[in-house]
Image (spheres, rainbow, N blue to C red):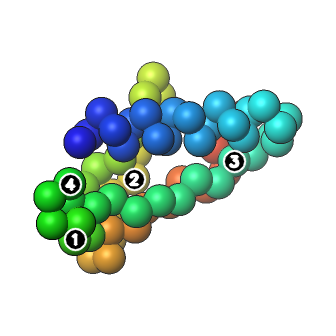
Amino acid sequence: MRILKLIIVYLSLNVALAFGQTNTKISGLVLDQVSLSPVSGATVIVQGTSYAATTDDKGTFQFENLPA
């Protein structure tokens, strides 16, 4: 499941880069694979960087002002 999250974040960054934006905002929702309930306290990492975010009690996370 963690690999799926990393892939989604990675693909989101690549799409933003393709449009030539200088700063990127990425947000998302982490759900349990079986119950589909929000996962709080999960760490989401942008692969190959030191950027990380933790999900809130509703399972949402957000990265802001990521360099393109």
The N terminus - image quarter: top left
Query: Disc 1 residue type?
Result: Ser
Q: Is residue 17 left or right of residue 32?
A: right
- In three-dimensional space, the C-alpha distance between marks 2 and 3, rounded to whole angstroms, equals 14 Å
Kindly identify the residue that appears in the image at 85 percent across and 35 percent down: 20
Q: Would you name the residue on which mark 2 appears?
A: 53
Mark 4 Cα shell of 10 Å, populated few (<14), some (14-19), many (≥20):
few
Q: Look at the numbered disc 3 and give the secondary structure of its residue.
A: strand
**In the figure, residue 21 lies in which quadrant?**
top right
Which sits earlier in the primary sequence, circle 2 or circle 3? 3
Q: x, y (%) of residue 68?
A: 72, 34
Kindly identify the residue that appears in the image at 28 percent across and 61 percent down: 31
- Marker disc for residue 29: none
Between label 4 and label 2, give the one nearer the viewer. Answer: 4
Q: Would you name the residue on which mark 3 appears?
A: 24
Q: Look at the numbered disc 4 and give the secondary structure of its residue.
A: loop
Q: Are marks 1 and 2 in contact (CB under 8 Å)?
A: no
Q: Is residue 7 above or below residue 38?
A: above
Kindly identify the residue that appears in the image at 20 percent across and 54 percent down: 33
Query: Disc 3 residue type?
Result: Thr
Between label 1 and label 2, give the one nearer the viewer. Answer: 1
Which sits earlier in the primary sequence, circle 3 or circle 4? 3
- In three-dimensional space, the C-alpha distance between marks 4 and 2, rounded to whole angstroms, equals 19 Å
- In three-dimensional space, the C-alpha distance between marks 3 and 4, rounded to whole angstroms, equals 27 Å
Q: Would you name the residue on which mark 1 appears?
A: 37
- In three-dimensional space, the C-alpha distance between marks 1 and 3, rounded to whole angstroms, equals 27 Å
Q: Would you name the residue on which mark 4 appears?
A: 33
Mark 3 Cα shell of 10 Å, populated few (<14), some (14-19), many (≥20):
some
Q: x, y (%) of residue 51?
A: 46, 40
Kindly identify the residue that appears in the image at 43 percent across and 34 percent down: 7
